[in-house]
Image (tube, rainbow, N blue to C red):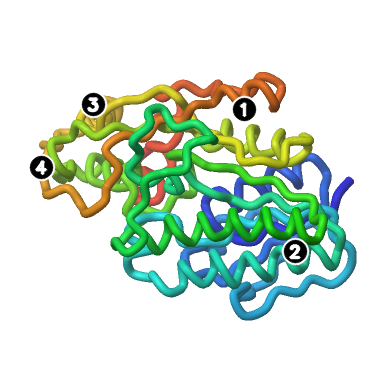
Amino acid sequence: MARILVTGGAGFIGSHLCERFLNENHEVVAVDNLLTGDRDNIAHLFENRKFSFLEQDITTYLYVRGDLDVIMHFASPASPVDYLELPIQTLKVGSLGTHKALGLAKEKKARILVASTSEVYGDPLVHPQQESYWGNVNPIGPRGVYDEAKRFMEAMTMAYRRSHGVDTRIVRIFNTYGPRMRMRDGRVVPNFMCQALQNEPLTVYGDGSQTRSFCYVDDLVEGITRLLWSDEQDPVNIGNPSEMTIQQFAEKIIKLSGSRSPIERRPLPEDDPKVRQPDITKAKRVLDNWGPKVSLDEGLGKTIGYFKSKLGLEA
């Protein structure tokens, strides 16, 4: 069994990873400064003697006593609302935080998996996006703080691998949803669900023709776990290749939630990607034929139940 550090362990994906590793009988240390993470996401884990939590800002300090076998670097604001409100913190965790995580991996001789994102592809000119694509990113636009932080993170990870022999993994995460997303996260799933469940207008930006693909968190965690224990050291896309327009997605949320919400249009934000769809050919090849298993209706049903409970509505 491994001793695993999860930075951003109180966040949406980080908390699910902590839970997965504990269920596999590993020892887990979660680190989070709770800037966008939530202690409630991991409250149920404190009863497990193999779980511990450290409240630290990894951009200034990251230290864990004892041996470490694995570091999962998932600390970062991750929604447009977050990184537009917290641009400096987003850049710092992608640069200084990554530097400290890689330094700790080097010191402890631990394998490190870093959480990159489909945003490294920017507003892509290649569709669907495969790992060999270098992206189309505006470095000085409002979204650049997140895009470039993650691109820098990948570059530094590869530098530590080449210069110091650190055992690294890079996952590029596409749109993911599920329980423990924040209600005011700012991403399309919590936005639409909170609006629909309260019969408020669903805000669709632009004409709604921009596309996204949605992967349920359990499928994502399975892919990340397989990547961690694989021999693949170059970036791997993990996401659901089933693509749909935002207009179609809004209509599905309204239907599944039984909402009476209308759809309200607003201007498209600057540099908002027009298309987003992962090419998961590599993941299938190197991760034992990994692919998403949870249907969109099933995953959205579970997520609607979670948001109902958070809003105090009858399940």
Picture quarter containing residue 230? top right
Residue drawn at (61%, 26%), measured in percent from left and top? 282
Residue at 84 percent across and 72 percent down: it is 65
Secondary structure category for the residue under label 4: strand
Given residues 10 and 130, the one toward you in this image is: 130
Residue position marked by numbered label 2 in the rendering: 52
The amino acid type of the residue labelled 3 equals Gln
Of tags 3 and 1, which is closer to the observer?
A: 1
For disc 4, the marked residue is: 264
Q: Earlier in the sequence, mark 2 or mark 3?
A: 2
The residue pinned by badge 3 equals 248
The three-letter amino acid code for the residue at tag 1 is Ala
Whether tag 3 and tag 4 are in contact, CB under 8 A, the answer is: no
* Residue in the foreground of this view, choosing between 134 and 68: 134
Which residue corresponds to mark 1?
A: 283
Q: Give the CA distance from mark 1 to mark 4.
A: 37 Å
- Which amino acid, by three-letter code, is at mark 4? Glu
Q: Position of residue 110 (x, y in %)?
A: 83, 56
Marks 3/1: CA–CA distance: 27 Å
Rendered-image quadrant of the C terminus:
top left
N-terminal of the two: label 3 or label 1?
A: 3
Q: Residues within 10 Å of mark 1 (few under 14, many from 20)?
A: many
Sequence-wise first label, 2 or 1: 2
Image coords of residue 151 (percent x, y): 51, 55
Image quarter of residue 109: bottom right
Q: Which mark is residue 92?
A: none
> Within 10 angstroms of label 2, few (less than 14), some, or many (20 or more) residues?
some
